[in-house]
């Protein structure tokens, strides 16, 4: 392996990396909250739900923890940046996959809660899960803790995908 393929520490300061990691996660959270909150009491409350549907209070608790882990994972991934060559392209792909899964995360709440499009929300959730798993795989070679931090997120989105599809079938 040549030195151009050896990861090096990011030239961004830890504070700059923190801002780059946190801002998109906060934006995703705000989009989710703005889409969800007005629909909980009316539309969502009227849906037929499966027996495994968690209580409403659990969702913001789970997402707060998951968003913190997502931001920390992204911060760590941004902290190791290969200089050039194929490893740099692989790192760029990992960062791109991270951005794509986060964009799908931001899209899910408006599709589900604002548009009331449960079938489409199931597709978005499944695509998000695929992208999270791919992000884990791509991140693994650069920072294993960053990859592991996304595993609970993948587990929750697996459950959320099942719940979304079940809600679509019941309603």
Image (cartoon, rainbow, N blue to C red):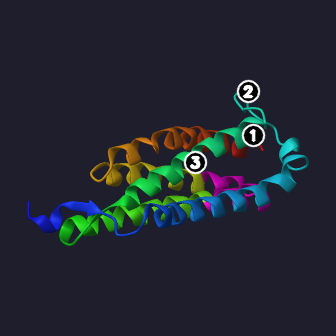
Asked whether the beta carbons under mark 1 and mark 3 sit within 8 Å of each other, the answer is no
Q: Residues within 10 Å of mark 2 (few under 14, many from 20)?
A: few
In the displayed structure, does residue 6 sit left or right of residue 137?
A: left
Give the quadrant of the C terminus: top right
Secondary element type, mark 3: helix
Q: Earlier in the sequence, mark 1 or mark 2?
A: 2
Q: Residues within 10 Å of mark 1 (few under 14, many from 20)?
A: few
* Front position in the image: 26 or 33: 26
Magenta stretch: residue 38 in it?
Answer: no
Q: Is residue 101 above or below residue 48?
A: below
Stretch in magenta? 106-122
In the displayed structure, does residue 139 sit left or right of residue 23?
A: left
Q: Residues within 10 Å of mark 3 (few under 14, many from 20)?
A: some
Secondary element type, mark 1: helix
Q: Which residue is mark 1?
A: 170
Residue 83: x %, y % from top left: 23, 70
Q: Rounded to the nearest whole Å, what is the CA distance between mark 2 and mark 3? A: 29 Å
Dividing the picture into quadrants, the one containing residue 165 is: top right
Residue 69: x %, y % from top left: 53, 46
Q: Main secondary structure of the magenta part?
A: helix
Q: Earlier in the sequence, mark 2 or mark 3?
A: 2
Q: Which residue is mark 2?
A: 51
Residue 165 visible: no
Residue at 50%, 43% (x, y): give it. Answer: 154
Residue at 8%, 60% (x, y): give it. Answer: 1
In the displayed structure, does residue 95 sit left or right of residue 115?
A: left
* Front position in the image: 39 or 145: 145
Of the numbered discs in the image, which one, if any, rests on residue 68? Answer: 3
Residue 118: x %, y % from top left: 71, 52
Depth check, mark 1 against mark 2: the one in front is 2
Residue 74 visible: yes
């Amino acid at each position: 392996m040549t030195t151009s393929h050896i990861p090096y520490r990011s030239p961004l300061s830890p504070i700059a990396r923190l801002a780059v990691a946190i801002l998109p996660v906060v934006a995703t959270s705000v989009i989710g909250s703005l889409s969800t909150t007005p629909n909980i009491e009316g539309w969502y409350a009227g849906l037929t739900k499966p027996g495994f549907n968690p209580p409403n209070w659990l969702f913001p608790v789970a997402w707060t923890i998951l968003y913190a882990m997502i931001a920390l994972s992204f911060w760590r991934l941004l902290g190791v940046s290969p200089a050039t060559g194929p490893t740099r392209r692989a790192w760029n792909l990992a960062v791109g996959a991270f951005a794509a899964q986060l964009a799908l995360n931001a899209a899910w709440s408006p599709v589900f809660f604002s548009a009331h499009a449960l079938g489409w929300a199931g597709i978005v959730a499944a695509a998000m899960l695929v992208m999270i798993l791919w992000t884990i795989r791509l991140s693994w070679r650069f920072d294993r803790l960053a990859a592991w931090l996304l595993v609970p997120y993948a587990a929750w989105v697996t459950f959320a995908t099942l719940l979304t599809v079940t809600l679509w079938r019941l309603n």
